């Protein structure tokens, strides 16, 4: 049984938040100190140069530890190509997954990227993209995916995962259960993939099963509706997809997180989103931009775990997964883990 004074930690560790600014400021201190946020996500606006981002990340970690809180997940999208927050001249430019043709190139990308992230105290890369695009399909994801068969996507993605994680950078396979066959950008609207589960199991799901086998630290759920699995809820809010498909059928017991809840594909009230996330046994609520939704999400998680014994029990299991990952990758920051 979690003691009442621990409920804030139980709620806050479920949130990964974005913020404004390039130094440890009052907003970041509030996210860490008051909301007990489990993680921060960086974007280009938070990054000026090598020394600045290194100090920003180390200062945030030091602040959390000074309050007796667990180390932070500090994440970034560093896929290469069009999605790369760390840019030259201080960081290496890679052209992206679509230009990685073999395992040697995958090893080079993952190795260099992991070393550079580690050098500035970032510990999680929200990559690789494990989505599969069938040959000839004009996907919104072209340029961000590995080209070729599901076998090749699985091989190259697994290689990136293993190479980053052996260098102590947590990898995150995305966007489960696969968004390769989408032509609509979920940043702006809700795409729908009308595929039968049997078809997806032979295609879209294969790279994610490979990621699980590669012991990927985390998986990110898509903001896509898959009526074959769930006619009502997109994957990022769906117990049928997050719990029954990913956790139970595929057997993934690592960290599960939503895509950014600020995206326009998710048009629900934040309180409803939180309820679905907790019921789906999703560990991390990702909210990438400053604003009232971060505090509202924290307050609703806190309220639900106090008043709902079943959700509290699920929350404790989620916290165990979060702490297990932090112990594995961040124990050098805190001997208390």
Image (cartoon, rainbow, N blue to C red):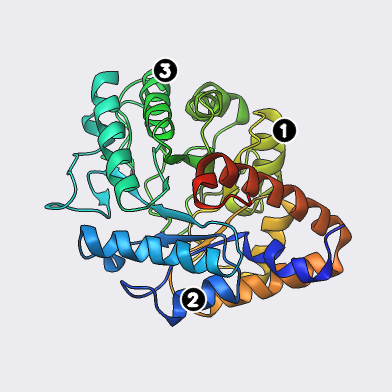
Asked if residue 326 can be seen in this view, the reply is: yes
* CA–CA distance in space, label 1 to label 2: 37 Å
* Label 3 with label 2: CB-CB less than 8 Å: no
The secondary element bearing badge 1 is classed as helix
* Observer-nearest of 312 and 236: 312
Left or right: residue 154 compared with residue 113: right
* Observer-nearest of 19 and 60: 60
Is 279 located above or below residue 29 in the figure?
above
Is 195 located above or below residue 318 in the figure?
above
Q: Could you tell me residue 268's position as x and y percent?
A: 60, 68
Q: Earlier in the sequence, mark 1 or mark 2?
A: 2
The secondary element bearing badge 2 is classed as helix
Q: Single out the mark in the foreground, 1 or 2.
A: 2
> Residue drawn 50% across and 25% down?
214
Q: Which residue is mark 2?
A: 29
Occupied quadrant, residue 113: top left
Q: Residues within 10 Å of mark 1 (few under 14, many from 20)?
A: few
* CA–CA distance in space, label 1 to label 3: 23 Å
Left or right: residue 197 compared with residue 22: right
Q: Which residue is mark 3?
A: 151
As drawn, the label of residue 41 is: none
The secondary element bearing badge 3 is classed as helix
Q: Could you tell me residue 299's position as x and y percent?
A: 68, 75
> Residue drawn 43% across and 33% down?
165
* CA–CA distance in space, label 3 to label 2: 44 Å
> Residue drawn 63% across and 52% down?
336
Q: Residues within 10 Å of mark 3 (few under 14, many from 20)?
A: some
Q: Earlier in the sequence, mark 3 or mark 2?
A: 2
Q: Which residue is mark 1?
A: 248
């Amino acid at each position: 049984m979690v003691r009442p004074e621990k409920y804030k930690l139980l709620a806050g560790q479920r949130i990964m938040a974005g913020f404004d600014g390039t130094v440890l400021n009052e907003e970041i201190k509030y996210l860490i100190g008051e909301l007990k946020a489990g993680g921060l996500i960086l974007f280009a606006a938070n990054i000026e140069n090598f020394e600045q981002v290194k100090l920003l990340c180390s200062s945030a970690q030091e602040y959390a530890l000074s309050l007796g809180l667990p180390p932070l997940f500090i994440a970034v999208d560093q896929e290469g190509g069009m999605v790369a927050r760390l840019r030259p001249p201080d960081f290496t430019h890679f052209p992206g997954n679509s230009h990685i043709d073999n395992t040697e190139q995958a090893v080079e990308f993952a190795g260099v990227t992991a070393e550079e992230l580690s050098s500035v105290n970032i510990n999680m890369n929200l990559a690789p993209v494990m989505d599969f695009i069938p040959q000839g399909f004009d996907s919104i994801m072209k340029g961000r995916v590995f080209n070729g068969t599901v076998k090749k996507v699985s091989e190259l993605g697994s290689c990136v995962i293993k190479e980053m994680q052996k260098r102590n950078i947590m990898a995150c396979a995305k966007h489960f259960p696969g968004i390769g066959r989408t032509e609509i950008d979920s940043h702006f609207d809700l795409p729908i993939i009308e595929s039968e589960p049997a078809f997806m199991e032979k295609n879209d799901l294969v790279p994610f099963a490979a990621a699980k086998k590669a012991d990927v630290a985390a998986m990110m759920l898509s903001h896509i509706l898959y009526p074959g699995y769930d006619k009502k809820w997109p994957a990022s809010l769906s117990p049928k997809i997050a719990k029954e498909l990913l956790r139970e059928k595929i057997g993934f017991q690592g960290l599960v997180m939503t895509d950014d809840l600020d995206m326009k594909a998710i048009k629900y009230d934040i309180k409803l989103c939180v309820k679905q996330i907790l019921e789906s046994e999703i560990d991390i609520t990702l909210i990438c931009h400053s604003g009232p939704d971060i505090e509202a999400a924290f307050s609703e998680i806190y309220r639900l775990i106090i008043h709902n014994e079943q959700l509290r029990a699920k929350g404790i299991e989620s916290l165990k997964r979060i702490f297990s990952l932090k112990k594995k990758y961040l124990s050098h920051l805190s001997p208390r883990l």
